[in-house]
Amino acid sequence: VQLVESGGGLVQPGGSLRLSCVASGRAFDMNGMGWYRQAPGKQRELVASITSRGRTDYAESAKGRFTISSDSAKNTVHLLMNRLTPEDTAVYYCNLDTRRFGSRIDYWGQGTQVTVSS
């Protein structure tokens, strides 16, 4: 399984970015996809996720500003980020959540840098 992210970059505070991730290859039961981020010196944290049935979950910091969407037919997930702040600066990782015999197996993209700065 390969996850390829795109859409990161430098943006001014208050601006917007749209991240995209395409999954390819053979995977077991796909439970959902999501976005995590890791800032320097901090642990990786969930930003937003969406299940194969369309249920979404957001970190408190993302609610009202970020929107996750997916196209299951294309194995693609997007993250629209609005009203970005410097605190959103991090490497953003695409995640594929799969299940095999009831156990979770995660796949990760290589990460895309998002920098919010004036």
Image (tube, rainbow, N blue to C red):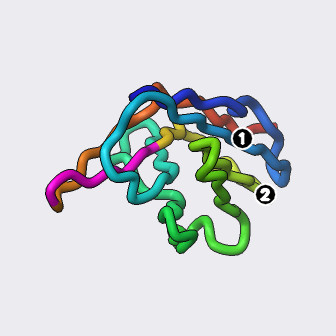
**Picture disc at residue 116:** 1
Name the residue at 48% across, 52% down.
33
| Relative to 105, 71 lies left or right | right
Is residue 89 covered in magenta?
no
Q: Could you tell me which quadrant the N terminus lies in?
A: top left
| Relative to 14, 49 lies left or right | left
Magenta region, main secondary structure: strand
Task: Please state which amino acid type lies under the numbered disc 2.
Answer: Asn
| Relative to 12, 91 lies left or right | left
Name the residue at 64% across, 36% down.
114
Task: Please state which amino acid type lies under the numbered disc 1.
Answer: Val
Q: Which residue is mark 2?
A: 82
Q: Secondary structure at mark 2?
A: loop
Residues 115 and 110: in front is: 110
Q: Could you tell me which quadrant the C terminus lies in?
A: top right
Is 81 located above or below residue 56 in the figure? Answer: above
Is 56 located above or below residue 26 in the figure? Answer: below
Residues 1 and 84: in front is: 1
Magenta residues, start to end: 95-101
